[in-house]
Structures are given as structure tokens and as C-alpha cells.
Image (cartoon, grey):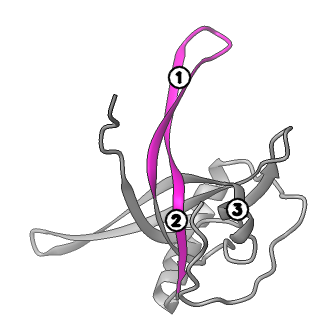
Amino acid sequence: MTNNLNSVIVEGNLTKDADFDSTQKGTGFCTFSVATNRYFKSGEEIQHEVSYFDVEAWGKLADSCRSLLVKGSGVRVVGRLKQDRWNSEDGKAKSRVKIVAEHIESKPVTAAEKAATASAAETVAESVPEVKPEAKPSRQKKSQKELVMA
């Protein structure tokens, strides 16, 4: 049996600090959301579109991200798409698609990207309840730090 191609690359900025946790068996993982910007021309006007992608990283990759994945930081995520499916309490079928990271690297953030991400993150933060991680990651600046692949 062979796998079909399932690969994705997303580059953008974190909308809030990553959340770190572990499974009952002790496997570490982190979750975060990446905002991506797309600019295109419609007639004579430049349009701006923002998309948000949920990402999760596991094991050593998640552990190595602790100091890098803070609100506004730029990241490039290489991974695969995964669809979670479940039934709600009222019996309706639900699903969502997320990115499971296989490789993450940080990237420098320009002042314009910081401003755009801060504005977009405020919009998201109003609609999504914030979950506080147990230990906040340090806010050290790193540039083009390539992380260990899981």
C-alpha cells in the first residue's frame, strides 16, 4: 500500500504564543496558529487577504520550539494536512483540518509584518478563548534558526 502525496508549506506569523502540553504517556506537543498574508490585484486596487492555519508539532520538534514560538514571530512550517472527525453532543458530524508539522524554522519579522499580525491577532483573540500554557516560552529573538526535524 502506498501513501498519496500530502504535503504543505506555510509561511507567516504566530497569532499568539504557542501552547505546550504533553500526553498521558509523556509525549510533548505544542499547538499554535499561523496567520498568512496574501496580496493580489483586483481591478486597480490591491487587495489583502489573511488566512489562519492551526498547527501542531510533536516530540523533539515541539520541545525545540519552546523559545521560538511566541506571538508575532515569523515561521515557516513544512508538514502534512490531517483531518480530525468527531460527533458533537447533538450527534452532528464535525471535522477540522490542521497542519501536523514535520519541520519548523523561524524567520526574521519585518516591522510591517509585526503590525499586520498584531492587528489580525487581536481579531482572532476576540473570538477564540485563550489557553495559558504552564510555562511561558522565553522571548529571545532568533533569526533563521533551523529546528531539528521530528
Question: How far apart are labels 2 and 3 at the CA level?
Answer: 11 Å
Vertical position of residue 90 compared to residue 109: above or below? above
Q: Earlier in the sequence, mark 3 or mark 1?
A: 3
Image x and y of residue 85, in percent:
54, 24
State which quadrant residue 88 falls in: top right
Task: Determine the residue positioned at 34% across, 28% down.
Answer: 1
Q: Quadrant of the C terminus?
A: bottom right
- Give yes or no for contact between labels 2 and 1 (Cβ–Cβ under 8 Å): no
Q: Earlier in the sequence, mark 2 or mark 3?
A: 3
Horizontal and vertical percent position of residue 86: 58, 20
Which residue occupies 81% across, 42% down?
A: 23
Q: Which mark is residue 60?
A: 3
Which amino acid, by three-letter code, is at mark 1? Lys
* Residue bearing the label numbered 2: 103
* Total numbered badges shown on the rendered structure: 3
Task: Give the vertical position of 81 relative to 111 (above or below).
Answer: above
- Find the distance from the CA under tag 2 to the CA under tag 1: 28 Å
Q: Residue at x 85, y 46 (%)?
A: 26
Q: Amino acid at mark 2?
A: His
Residue labelled with disc 1: 94
